[in-house]
């Protein structure tokens, strides 16, 4: 059975139940022409207005990630993101001449099926807004733990009305092309139905989810965009460790650790520090001070039992092992696990960071695989960082950002320009 | 003094008095633990001053999985008489628990003092729902073997009713019938692992339409609830079905909770359905978020403290089991001290989204 929480511009307090996707897709398909007829600039204006409404209501900020989402939805950022993807935004509205007599247009791919992961509640909005900008129809399968947040976050679109070039455009019309549903991942038949409807499958999730969904049957013309399991870490080089700006860098890094319960693919799990006049233990204490300051200001969500078990076992290991060290709170507010083994560690989560000292940050190059997404960097030496970035990105890193920005959603993400994957390039040759 | 507490009748000491006595004994034992370099490292990192520990809650606990990765031996190598291994159903490596002579004697004495309170001290004919090989005379013993060895000291004329055929357990119906015929009017003891009783014994009885007639038995079972919970079999249903199969009352089917890392400390269900802590041990149910002891009625991680061990740090072991703190000194069964309820193992699987594990998963053979 499918639980539908939003269909077209209707929100259901009690989810409507459907046996299959037929009626849902019929409803969404009705608005194919409507969304196609809205100029991209008008969609940008609606989204900008949406950002204003979200930022104006305190209750939305209770949902983690909304503060950054609001900035991301602003006109300036959306326009910049579109330009990164398309260079000329007009190509979404009309055939543009790229050679004498030769024209090209970015047409919507059609139905985009979003398979959303549950670890970051705002993920659905990033995925949906980009698909809407490309004028696609959208079906989102959202995990139960975040579906209510997603629905609440979308509601403000209902009442948006903007004027563009003398015409009225409505947020409600964007929603008409969208369905928000849930069904358990073990419902193979429903998974197959959803997959077969897709012209694009966007998959956000861990290895099991990605492997399951990509094996489902699909149209031969269907495009897959996979945002699969990724791993992130950070490096502080000697110049930063000996800099007066070090405390701020640790403060920023503490924010990276604590965001999204350290569950995001961009959440750092390990921090490598270069040998400097600051000892490993001193660095650990400095980081613990930054974490404590941040914990005081934020209300920390309770930690799942499974994470508690992982933290207890790692703490036990680092307490008992004579070659390792640990700084942690009495409860589970933070755990810093210190050693000198040059390796990446399985994520523990729950504000648990491995702090490792290396002679030279270039030693981490050998650890890089295509599974590494983000490296947070803290350095006072840009040239060093460019060299480091060159070396590690060759081996697989998708993005290197200053610490404090690791969890800021950006385009490209995982090395993919998402919107450029959500259109098909149609050519017109008049010569 | 600890040996006296172990040998005495159990569940008689009021909580406050017990805590005071036990704390003194455990602090002495903790000092001995410092001979182990890993434990010494732990105490140093935690800034533990043993003399200043003022409550049982402050005693540094060892997460139970640490017995898998570290040699937590606190006696000399030549003093080891046995090494216990956990079943390792959920982990990669089995636990290694080193036992010296003194620990072994205390564990046996402790077990007897506890069991006496529930099943009396008379030895009686005993059926073991397992195969003989699991309790073989080796210096290494599995959790199943250790539990059988412990419980079997209350039995005589042991009869193992399962056969190990190419590594698989099969019920020997003939041997079972002989036991029933011989002891049907007598008080008998039966022991088995919960999951084995359900999947290899009761199932076979049902398939063969066999009903037993052993009304005067006491059946003790332990371990393996995880698999039964997955099959949606609860404690009440288990009791009902097993009691019917043996032709006895449900109150004669007794669940007990214990672990290879705390052999000698077992928690049997009392007449009111709760698990009681003996006078030589303690249970602290710790909150999942704060790690402080929970309030009555709340759930948390079960920590088991005991004064039995001289060969490994059994003074405080934090398990991955969840319990409910039910009461202190006031159970209707009359036993004193804390009492609790075992709830489940910690659920370890979770959906982690795109921040999944680092390693690519490999096919398991």
Image (cartoon, grey):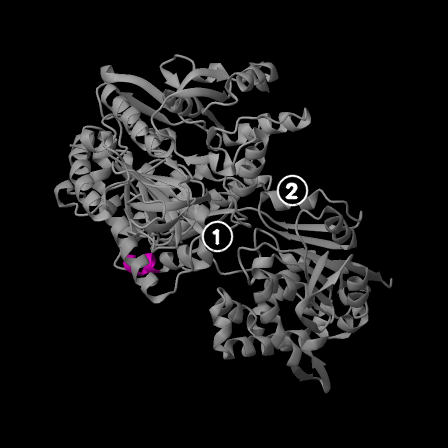
Locate residue B160, reporting x and y percent.
Answer: 50, 17
Residue at x-position 51% and y-position 49%: B355
Quadrant assignment for the N terminus of chain B: top left
> Label 2: which residue?
A211
Snapshot quadrant of residue A20: bottom right
Give the residue displayed 68% in from the left and 26% down from the top: B207
The residue labelled by disc 1 is A263
* Mark 2 to mark 1 CA distance (whole Å): 20 Å
- Asked if residue A357 can be seen in this view, the reply is no
Residue sitting at the far top: B137
Q: Position of residue A126 (x, y in %)?
A: 59, 63
Q: SS for tag 2?
A: helix
A33 sits to left or right of A271: right
- Of A408 and A182, the residue lying toward us: A182
Residue A361 sits inside the magenta stretch:
no
The quarter of the rendered structure image containing the C terminus of chain B is: top right
Majority SS type along the magenta span:
helix
Q: Residue furthest bottom?
A: A166
Residue nearest the viewer, comparing B274 with A59: B274
- Residue B306, position in %: x, y? 27, 35
**SS for tag 1?**
loop
Q: Is residue A7 visible?
A: yes
* Circles 2 and 1 in contact, beta carbons < 8 Å: no
Q: Which mark is residue A44?
A: none
Q: Mark 2 or mark 1: which comes first in sequence?
A: 2
Q: Residues within 10 Å of mark 2 (few under 14, many from 20)?
A: few
Q: Nearer the viewer, residue A324 or A163?
A: A324
Q: Which residues are magenta?
A: A246-251
Please name whichever residue, B288 or A230, is drawn nearer the observer in this view of the structure: B288
The image position of residue A146, as x and y in percent, is 57, 61
Residue B290, above or below A76: above
């Amino acid at each position: 059975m499918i639980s539908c929480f939003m269909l077209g511009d209707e929100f259901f307090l009690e989810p409507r139940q459907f046996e299959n996707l037929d009626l849902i897709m019929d409803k969404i398909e009705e608005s194919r022409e409507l969304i196609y007829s809205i100029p991209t600039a008008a969609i940008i204006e609606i989204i900008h207005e949406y950002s204003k409404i979200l930022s104006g209501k305190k209750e939305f900020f209770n949902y983690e990630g909304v503060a950054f989402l609001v900035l991301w939805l602003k006109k300036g950022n959306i326009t910049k993101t579109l330009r990164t993807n398309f260079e000329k935004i007009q190509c979404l509205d009309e055939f543009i001449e790229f050679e004498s007599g030769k024209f090209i247009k970015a047409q919507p791919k059609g139905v985009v099926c979003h398979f959303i992961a549950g670890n970051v509640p705002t993920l659905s909005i990033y995925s949906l807004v980009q698909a809407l900008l490309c004028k696609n129809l959208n079906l989102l399968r959202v995990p139960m733990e975040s579906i209510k947040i997603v629905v609440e976050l979308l509601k403000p679109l209902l009442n948006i009305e903007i004027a563009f070039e003398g015409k009225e455009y409505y947020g409600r019309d964007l929603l008409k092309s969208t369905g928000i549903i849930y069904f358990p991942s073990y419902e193979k038949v429903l998974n197959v139905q959803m997959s077969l409807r897709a012209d694009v499958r966007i998959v956000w999730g861990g290895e099991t989810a990605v492997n399951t969904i990509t094996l489902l049957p699909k149209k031969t013309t269907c495009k897959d965009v996979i945002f699969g399991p990724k791993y992130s870490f950070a490096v502080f080089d000697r110049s930063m460790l000996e800099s007066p700006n070090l405390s701020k860098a640790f403060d920023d890094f503490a924010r990276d650790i604590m965001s999204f319960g350290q569950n995001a693919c961009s959440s750092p799990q390990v921090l490598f520090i270069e040998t400097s006049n600051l000892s490993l233990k001193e660095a650990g204490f400095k980081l613990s001070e930054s974490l404590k300051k941040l914990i005081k200001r934020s209300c920390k969500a309770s930690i799942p039992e499974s994470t508690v078990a992982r933290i207890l076992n790692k703490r036990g290991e680092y307490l008992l092992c004579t070659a390792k060290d640990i700084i942690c709170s009495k409860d589970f507010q933070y755990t810093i696990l210190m050693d000198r083994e040059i390796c990446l560690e399985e994520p523990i989560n729950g504000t648990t960071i491995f702090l490792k000292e290396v002679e030279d940050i270039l030693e981490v190059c050998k650890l890089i695989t295509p599974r590494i997404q983000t490296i947070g960097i803290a350095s006072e030496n840009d040239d060093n960082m460019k060299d480091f970035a060159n070396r590690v990105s060759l081996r697989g890193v998708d993005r290197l950002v200053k610490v404090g920005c690791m969890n800021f959603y950006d385009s490209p993400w995982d090395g993919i320009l998402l919107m450029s994957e959500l259109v098909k390039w149609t050519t017109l040759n008049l010569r | 003094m600890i040996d006296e507490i172990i040998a005495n009748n159990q569940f008689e000491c009021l909580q406050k008095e017990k805590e005071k006595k036990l704390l003194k004994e455990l602090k002495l034992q903790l000092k001995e633990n410092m001979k182990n370099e890993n434990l010494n490292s732990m105490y140093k990192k935690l800034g533990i001053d043993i003399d200043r520990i003022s409550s049982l809650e402050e005693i540094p606990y060892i997460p139970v999985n640490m017995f898998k990765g570290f040699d937590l031996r606190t006696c000399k190598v030549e003093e080891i008489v046995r090494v216990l291994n956990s079943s390792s159903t959920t982990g990669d490596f089995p636990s290694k628990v080193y036992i010296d002579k003194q620990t072994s004697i205390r564990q046996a004495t402790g077990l007897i003092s506890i069991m006496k309170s529930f099943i009396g001290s008379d030895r009686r004919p005993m059926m073991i729902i397992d195969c003989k090989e699991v309790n073989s005379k080796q210096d290494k013993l599995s959790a199943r073997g250790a539990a059988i060895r412990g419980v079997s000291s209350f039995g005589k004329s042991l009869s193992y009713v399962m056969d190990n055929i190419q590594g698989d357990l099969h019920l020997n119906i003939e041997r079972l019938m002989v036991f029933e015929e011989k002891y049907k009017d007598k008080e008998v003891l039966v022991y088995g692992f919960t999951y084995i009783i359900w999947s290899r014994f009761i199932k076979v009885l049902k398939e063969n339409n066999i009903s037993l007639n052993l009304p005067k038995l006491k059946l003790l079972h332990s371990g393996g609830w995880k698999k039964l919970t997955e099959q949606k079999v609860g404690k009440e249903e288990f009791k009902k079905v097993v009691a019917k199969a043996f032709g006895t009352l449900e109150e004669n089917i007794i669940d007990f909770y214990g672990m290879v890392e705390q052999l000698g400390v077992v928690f049997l269900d009392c007449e009111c359905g709760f698990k009681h802590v003996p006078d030589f041990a303690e249970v602290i149910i710790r909150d999942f978020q704060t790690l402080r002891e929970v309030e009555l009625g709340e759930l948390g991680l079960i920590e088991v403290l005991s004064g039995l061990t001289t060969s490994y740090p059994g003074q405080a072991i934090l398990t991955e089991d969840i319990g409910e703190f039910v009461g202190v000194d006031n159970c209707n069964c009359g036993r004193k001290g804390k009492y609790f309820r075992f709830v489940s193992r910690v659920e370890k699987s979770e959906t982690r989204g795109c921040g999944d594990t680092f390693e690519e998963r490999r096919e398991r053979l």
